[in-house]
Amino acid sequence: MARRTGSSPGGQRDAGDGGSRGRGRRTGGGATGSSGVAAARASQLTKVYGSGDTIVTALRGIDLGFPRGRFTAIMGPSGSGKSTLMHCLAGLDTVTRGRVFIGDVDLSRLSDKELTRLRRDRIGFIFQQFNLLPTLTAAENITLPLSIAGRAPDKEWMRTVVDAVGLAPRLGHRPPELSGGQQQRVACARALVTRPEIIFADEPTGNLDSRSGAEVLQFLRDSVTDLGQTIVMVTHDATAASYSDEVIFLADGRLVDAIERPTADEVLDRMKHLDAAQRGLVSPAADTGGYEAEDDYDDESDLDEESYGASRHRGGDRGGRYDDGYDRPDEDPADRNRRGPRQPGRDYPARDYPDQRYGDDGGGAGGYDRRYAEQLTGEFDAIPDGPPAGARGPGGGRAAAGRDGREGRLASAPGRGGGT
Ligand SMILES: Nc1ncnc2c1ncn2[C@@H]1O[C@H](COP(=O)(O)OP(=O)(O)OP(=O)(O)O)[C@@H](O)[C@H]1O
């Protein structure tokens, strides 16, 4: 049975809280939280891109559940499948095998129209690039998903969200008049305003300085703690992950580890092992540090080896071969390494990312990706050119004074785990 190493607080807590937040519940896709059904879950999720010479298996039979009212971070080396997992969970990408559920809805059973509606009504999105409409005010951007759905904002909830995100004095401003951190807080408010069952955040602080990043992270943390929101966040940043209730780690398309209530140091440590394993794979001479996740657990939880331990790589194993009997005929890791992570603002040849449906349109930080609106509407044509009717928030399109003259309580809130 797998064993956890080091002084992870997860192990201590498991004993103390009766396992109610135990990481073992991750596997089997059954993690639910108090309300019975997981906010999102994957069952034997496999994702294969391309075919023939260009085939890439991005996810390999992942079983995973996201309990309600929790903040989960997804980490892993570049190319480990984080974005793919999130896109599949959010219904932004199709799965090759297995199933994905939002609540009790099996996404594979939905038509495109139903999927669009589900994304619009039940899922919130936060992207690295903010994806705000530059011609709309902050208030109008926040209520855009409701406007597209033809729904009026619930004024009280809107006020709660705007207050929480500390944007009251900026509601009448347009994105170019806002700092990056303020723009991302608008995007956070937009994600929350529909009261989604789950918010997926893809590198939400990737374009922010550390102070703005800390504000956004603290807001996300507060929205889970105070408002009961469920958040799943992909990040490369150990400090960002330390704001979460649990961080899960992917490597080579598999779930290989998890830490409850992580500290930045614990996350960094775990990432070092995973990165070392990956470096050993693609450049064996460079690093021979071993990653042996299979033997790194000590509890008797229901961790299954398939999800947590089987894709380990021992650093002493040269030539890019794994000693777990698991071969990877479909991908030369060196190719992936050369290609590197997809960077915002760059175009990639279709050969490298043939199935890519969503990403950056080259607008750079603060730009607007029309594909965001497609996620809400299902159609590019439905994206408004100007302020949509009824898209006025509590600021009424005018700059409104904050109650206490501050931009928000987040501005001075220190982050958990030492902040940034
Ligand atoms: N549209 C696509 N077509 C082909 N291969 C893809 C596509 N999208 C991702 N991949 C490949 O799938 C694997 C997982 O990619 P993914 O982007 O999910 O990883 P990631 O962990 O999010 O990486 P990063 O941290 O660099 O963003 C990689 O090998 C990647 O090259």
Image (cartoon, grey):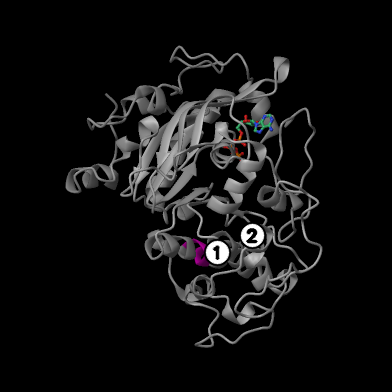
Circle 1 SS class: helix
**Residue in view at x 51 percent, y 77 percent:** 408
Question: Toward the viewer: 85 or 69?
Answer: 69
Which corner quadrant of the image does residue 417 belong to?
bottom left
**Residue in view at x 32 percent, y 39 percent:** 23
- Secondary structure, magenta segment, majority class: helix
- What residue is shown with label 1? 193
Which residues are the magenta region? 213-217
Percent x, y of residue 268: 44, 46
Q: Is residue 348 magenta?
A: no
Q: Is mark 1 within 8 Å of ligand 1?
A: no
The disc, 2 or 1, on the residue closer to the chain's N-terminal end is: 2
Circles 2 and 1: CB distance less than 8 Å? yes
Q: Is residue 123 visible?
A: no
Q: Quadrant of ligand 1?
A: top right
Give above or below for 420 relative to 292.
below
- Give how far apart the Cα atoms at labels 2 and 1 are: 8 Å
**For this view, does 291 lie left or right of residue 388?**
left
Amino acid at the residue labelled 2: Pro
- What residue is shown with label 2? 145
Percent x, y of residue 189: 56, 65
Give above or below for 104 relative to 302.
below
**Residue in view at x 75 percent, y 55 percent:** 364
Considering the image in quadrants, where does the N terminus appear?
top left
Question: Toward the viewer: 350 or 152?
Answer: 152
Give above or below for 401 relative to 99.
below
Q: Is residue 127 visible?
A: yes
Question: Toward the viewer: 242 or 183?
Answer: 183
